[in-house]
Amino acid sequence: MTIRSILDIIDAVLLSDKERHLDIEVTVACGADLMSDVLAYSESGLLLLTGLNKPQTVRTAELSDIKAIAFVRGKVPDTATIKLADEKDIPLLVTGLSMFEACGRLYQHGLRGVSTLCILNARKR
Amino acid sequence: MPENDNFETGLFFLTGGDFDRAGEASSELRKVLLSKDISLDIIRRASIAAFEAEINVIVYATAGMLRFTLDDKCLHVVVEDMGPGIEDINLAMQEGYSTASEEVRAMGWGAGMGLPNMKKNADEFLLLSDVGIGTTVELVFYLKPKRIKTL
């Protein structure tokens, strides 16, 4: 699913002026406010939905190959966060929807989460 | 170092409580790895594990450092700190166990996943800790991994 479609589905705005960000594809999604959990259970190629609008969200995304971040509940990030995302070339989206509503809409449109199997495997390893 | 294309070392100082810069050292390490011929899966695992170790220093210790040595066979990351040390390592290795403050949790950290996640991502993981003195984490990543797949 492209960022372009995601913006439309969750009524979000893109905090970036890079046209090519619209064509970035994500294959799975994950919703979490705890970056510790994101680091433990994420996959590459991921869209992260979160309410944590801080630079550490961008760091987490950079270091775990997350493709894009969508801030829910209208959590607009501060300039330090936007600047860091720009440096790391990670698109930031903001939606006024709740976490549940945003995830629900994306799921309805066919985007799936990090598989349960992946989480179980991670726990076993 | 004879005929070793990958050879590189690095050292970064970490300051306890400096959350704004948390991840910078790991980010620099990742940049070095990306400039070499190393598989993206290994880079991702190394970045995540180094980041977890870096966050632990910032959350718990006064100061610390992250060092790495890279050669053709492996990446060796050592993160040591001047911190309170870990009283019960078995307990600390349990997923979900954490002694982090509410403040730290509000920043998205302290879910008790850090140490188990380092162990999960590294090919070799060594944790040494002296209460009142500090903690050292050693992470080794084989660049041509022979990992046994589990279901």
Image (cartoon, rainbow, N blue to C red):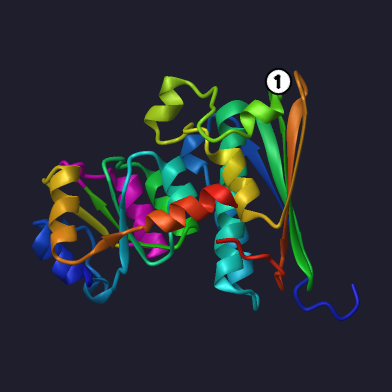
- Give A24 or A112, whichever is nearer the viewer: A112
Question: B34 above or below B151?
Answer: below
Provide residue A84's location: percent of width, then percent of height.
Answer: 39, 54
Segment tinted magenta in the rendering? A72-90
A21 sits left or right of B77 in the view: left
Provide residue B73's location: percent of width, then percent of height.
Answer: 79, 70
Question: B148 above or below A103?
Answer: below
Question: A73 above or below B47?
Answer: above
Question: B65 above or below B45?
Answer: above
- Give B147 or B112, whichever is nearer the viewer: B147
Q: Residue at x 75, y 27 (%)?
A: B134
Q: Helix or strand or loop: what does disc 1 sit on?
A: loop
- Name the subunit of mark 1: B
Residue B120 in sight: yes
Name the residue furthest right.
B2
**Snapshot quadrant of residue A55:** top left
Provide residue B44's location: percent of width, then percent of height.
Answer: 55, 62
Taking the magenta stretch, the answer to whether it contains residue A93 is no
The number of discs equals: 1
Provide residue B61's location: percent of width, then percent of height.
Answer: 64, 27
- Quarter the N terminus of chain B occupies: bottom right
B106 sits left or right of A104 in the view: right
Q: Residue at x 54, y 35 (%)?
A: B95
Q: Residue at x 63, y 67 (%)?
A: B33
In this figure, which residue is indicated by the disc labeled 1? B87
Residue B28 in sight: no
A58 sits left or right of B41 in the view: left
Within-10-Å neighbours for mark 1: few <14, some 14–19, many 20+: few
- Quarter the C terminus of chain B occupies: bottom right
- Amino acid at circle 1: Glu
**Snapshot quadrant of residue A12:** bottom left
